[in-house]
Image (spheres, helix red, strand yellow):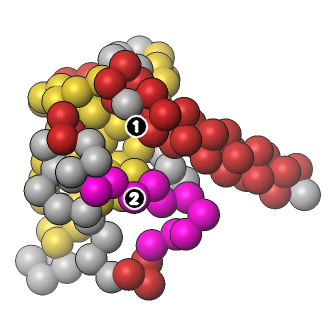
């Protein structure tokens, strides 16, 4: 599972309907969290360019990574880790650790950098 680029079901709040809903979202599995859970990174098209984090969002151009089956330029949000239950992972598309090792290393390096910053901030 580690390195898998997949589709997973994620909850979100629909402001217009004022209720929780679910949607499929591309994600990258980066670690095992234990008890059937995985640490994942969301992949998003980031609709507003001002929301792109130049330090931590990793840009994906579909023609550069054809095995990922992306329909548009997207970003691996390396600073937005989440835990995903294994049953919410519905489809594995490609293992980027194997197919795109340079990309995977870049993402993990950014995750590590952000994690170190978070720990330093927590220790204050």
Q: Sequence-wise, which precedes: disc 1 or disc 2? A: 1
The image shows residue 120 at horizontal and vertical percentages of 84, 51
Q: Based on the displayed image, in which of its 4 quarters is residue 37 positioned?
A: top left
In the image, which residues are magenta?
A: 52-61
In the image, 94 versus 9, the foreground residue is 94
Instruction: Report whether 48 appears left or right of 123.
Output: left
Residue shown at the point (45%, 73%) measured from the top left: 52
Q: Any magenta on residue 25?
A: no
The image shows residue 10 at horizontal and vertical percentages of 23, 48
Q: Is residue 10 above or below residue 1?
A: below
The image shows residue 80 at horizontal and vertical percentages of 48, 53
Residue shown at the point (33%, 82%) measured from the top left: 48
Residue 83 appears in the picture as rendered = no
The image shows residue 58 at horizontal and vertical percentages of 45, 55
Residue shown at the point (21%, 51%) measured from the top left: 63
Quickly name the residue at label 1.
Answer: 40
């Amino acid at each position: 599972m580690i390195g898998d680029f997949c589709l997973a079901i994620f909850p979100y709040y629909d402001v217009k309907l004022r209720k929780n809903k679910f949607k499929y979202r591309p994600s990258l599995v980066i670690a095992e969290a234990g008890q059937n859970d995985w640490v994942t990174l969301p992949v998003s098209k980031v609709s507003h360019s001002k929301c792109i984090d130049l330090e931590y969002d990793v840009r994906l151009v579909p023609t550069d990574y054809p095995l990922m089956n992306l329909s548009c330029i997207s970003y691996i949000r390396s600073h937005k880790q989440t835990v995903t239950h294994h049953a919410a992972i519905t489809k594995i598309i490609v293992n980027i650790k194997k197919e795109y090792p340079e990309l995977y290393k870049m993402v993990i390096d950014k995750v590590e950098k952000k994690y170190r910053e978070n720990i330093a901030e927590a220790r204050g």
